[in-house]
Image: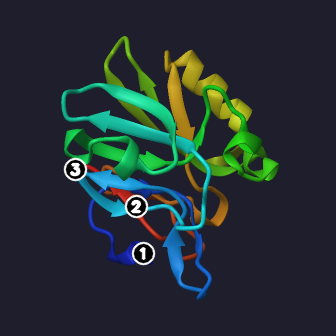
């Protein structure tokens, strides 16, 4: 569990989290950092979900993946996190509740291949639906992207300024330097 006051540097909230059968807080999606699996989906979860992957060679993909450590060679991955695929948005295929598309404070990752940049947005001043996030990313030239955990799990700090504080402790964060 992450309490924002202990997070140093810039960050946004990471993938979704839930509880396992014992009540322990666990990741619902995968996270990979420099080839190391740092969070794995719930063990009983048998669905492929949108996963944003940045490979060490600079290639970026969003793929629906169930077990990243089985379906990918982790040593090739610089960064990966699971959310829900925005291109196309099909929450039921990824077993996410339809309410995840509702207007909410949310974080999304998008990729614009024309500028070879990953774009990170944390909508914290205005509740934004998944459809609105898709439109914003599309207008910025993004052709792929995922939605991350939203609502009370939305947290962000950019250039040392806290933009939004989660209303609950969150399972993980995405940091950069």
In the drawing, what numbered circle is on residue 35? 3
Residue lying at the far top of the rendered structure: 114
Residue at the disc numbered 2: 173
Across and down, in percent, residue 165 comes to 52, 66
Residue 10 position, x and y percent, is: 32, 55
**Residue 129 seen:** no
- Residue 28: name its quadrant: bottom right
User: Dot 2: within a 10 Å radius of its alpha carbon, few (fewer than 14), some, or many (20 or more) residues?
Assistant: many
Where is residue 79? Give x, y as percent: 30, 45
**81 above or below 14?**
above
Front residue of this view, candidates 33 and 118: 33
Q: Which residue is drawn at 35% across and 28% down?
A: 60
> Tag 1 or tag 2, which sits nearer the N-term?
1
Reading the image, the residue beneath label 1 is: 2
Instruction: Decide: few, some or many residues near mark 1? Use Cα within 10 Å; few <14, some 14-19, many ≥20.
Output: some
98 versus 36 height, above or below: above
Measured in 3D between alpha carbons, the distance from the residue under mark 2 to the one under mark 1, in whole angstroms, is 8 Å
Q: Is mark 2 on a helix, strand or loop?
A: strand
Asked whether the residues under the numbered discs 2 and 1 touch, taking CB atoms below 8 Å apart as contact, a structural biologist would say yes
């Amino acid at each position: 569990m992450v309490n924002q006051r202990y997070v140093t540097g810039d960050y946004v909230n990471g993938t979704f989290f839930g509880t396992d059968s014992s009540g322990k807080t666990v990741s619902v999606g995968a996270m990979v950092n420099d080839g190391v699996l740092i969070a794995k989906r719930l063990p009983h979860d048998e669905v492929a979900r949108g996963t944003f992957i940045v490979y060490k060679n600079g290639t970026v993909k969003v793929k629906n993946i169930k077990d990243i450590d089985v379906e990918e060679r982790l040593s090739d991955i610089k960064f990966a996190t699971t959310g829900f695929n925005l291109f196309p948005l099909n929450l039921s295929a990824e077993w996410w509740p339809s309410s995840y598309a509702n207007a909410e404070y949310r974080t999304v990752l998008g990729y614009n291949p024309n500028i070879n940049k990953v774009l990170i947005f944390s909508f914290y001043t205005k509740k934004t639906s998944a459809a609105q996030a898709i439109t914003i990313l599309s207008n910025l030239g993004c052709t792929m992207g995922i939605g991350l955990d939203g609502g009370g799990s939305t947290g962000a700090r950019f250039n040392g300024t806290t933009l939004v504080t989660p209303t609950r402790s969150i399972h993980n964060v995405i940091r950069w330097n």
